[in-house]
Amino acid sequence: MEALQTTFKEHLIDFVFYCRARQFVLSPQQTLEAFEITEKHFLTHRKTFQYALKSIFCKSKEHADRFDEMFDRFWSRFYKEELEQRPFQLKAQEKKSESASLIFMGATFPNPNKQKEEEAKKTTGANATTLLRETDFSKIAAADKEQLEELAEALFHEMSLRFKRRLKKSKSGRINIQNTIRKSLSKGGLMLDLAYKKKAKEKRKVVFLLDVSGSMDTYSFYLLRYILVLKKYFKSLEFFSFSTRLTHVTPLLRTNDESAIYKAIGRHVKGWSSGTKIGASLKEFCDLYGHKFLSQKHIVVILSDGLETGNVSDLQTAVKTIQKRCKSLIWLNPLKGMANYQPIQKGIINVMPHLDRFETAHNLNSLLKLEKILMNV
């Protein structure tokens, strides 16, 4: 029992730091409250424990939207290995030691003997993170996939905060004389505060067309996660998947529960990991949805390796049509991230003249670069 309680304490402390590393601002009081709920025997009931922590840790809708996935990712192994194998009821702790309370609050105590060891670990960890950011998704070892997913979560969240800050900014234009005079009346006619005509910043409209054929399988999951982050920060974001058939995925994105979205996509998306007919799929998009989602206000992003098995002429015609009708057409090709890559595939050769930008999307760093492209279009 004592050993298990100790294991739980360590897990909860780690979870606090895990949340802080993901921009959750947790005070010492919130941390202590998290430990106090264990005295009410919530731990043995996973959902109750989860909702109790959520009520303490989440002070914004953005945090609430992310918390459930973070909780499942962090605690699933603990519940499987500890609680499910050895069910128990935690007894109320009669006394908390001073050192334990300080640990709960996030205090740390310097250890001169381990300082060099800790510095070495930090350096190693930083190098590992840099390597993961630069590694091609298709070359990630199975042992590193969980770490890559956590890193992607953190980096995509930071990106979402940058999007939010940029969209909130409003540039001041010329002075608005009428509003300036109106504001001065309450100050005896003194024009102390100038009113400006603000330039309205319209949120961009973007359409993603994601290739989910077999050759794109290792990239599709991370590209999908990236799209789920972006959907909150565009006035209109439409998402389509294609292989041999086109699927309109946007209606499946209404919920903020990512696990529910993945399950819905698994049930409804046609042809995941199958063959690919890019031209036929893009033609279907133009014919069925072009009147709604192609205009000079739309940015269209195609994510595909360009390995066409259908009619290349259909592909060229469809891409040419899309480029003429949208504001900007961006093609992201994971193969471009490979050393000595040359766009020699028939599909790519035929569409290159009609693209506004041709970029890669093979690792985390390349996806993060797309942020600047989208914001500057």
Image (cartoon, grey):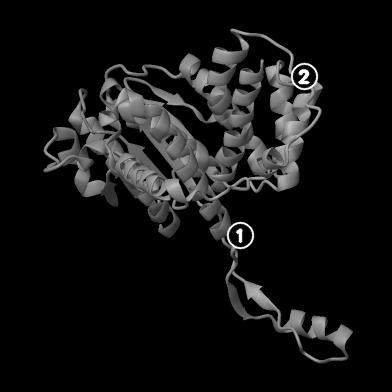
Residue at image location 34% in from the left, 25% down from the top:
143
Q: Secondary structure at mark 1?
A: helix
Task: Answer left or right for 191 relative to 333.
Answer: right
Q: Is residue 284 visible?
A: no
The tag earlier along the polypeptide, 2 or 1, is: 2
Disc number placed over residue 168 in the picture, else none? 1
Task: Answer left or right for 351 relative to 251.
Answer: left
Q: Secondary structure at mark 2?
A: loop
| Amino acid beneath label 1 | Lys
Residue at image location 71% in from the left, 46% down from the top:
28
Expressed as whole percent of the image width and height from the top left, the position of residue 302 reads 34, 38
Q: Find the distance from the CA under tag 2 to the CA under tag 1.
A: 49 Å
Say above or below: 20 vs 212: below
To which residue does mark 2 refer? 91
| Labelled pair 2, 1 in contact (Cβ < 8 Å) | no
Mark 1 is surrounded, within 10 Å at the Cα level, by few (under 14), some (14 to 19) or many (20 or more) other residues, namely: few
Res 180 quadrant in image: bottom right
Expressed as whole percent of the image width and height from the top left, the position of residue 275 reads 27, 18
Task: Answer left or right for 156 relative to 37.
Answer: left
Expressed as whole percent of the image width and height from the top left, the position of residue 18 reads 55, 38
Q: Is residue 304 visible?
A: yes
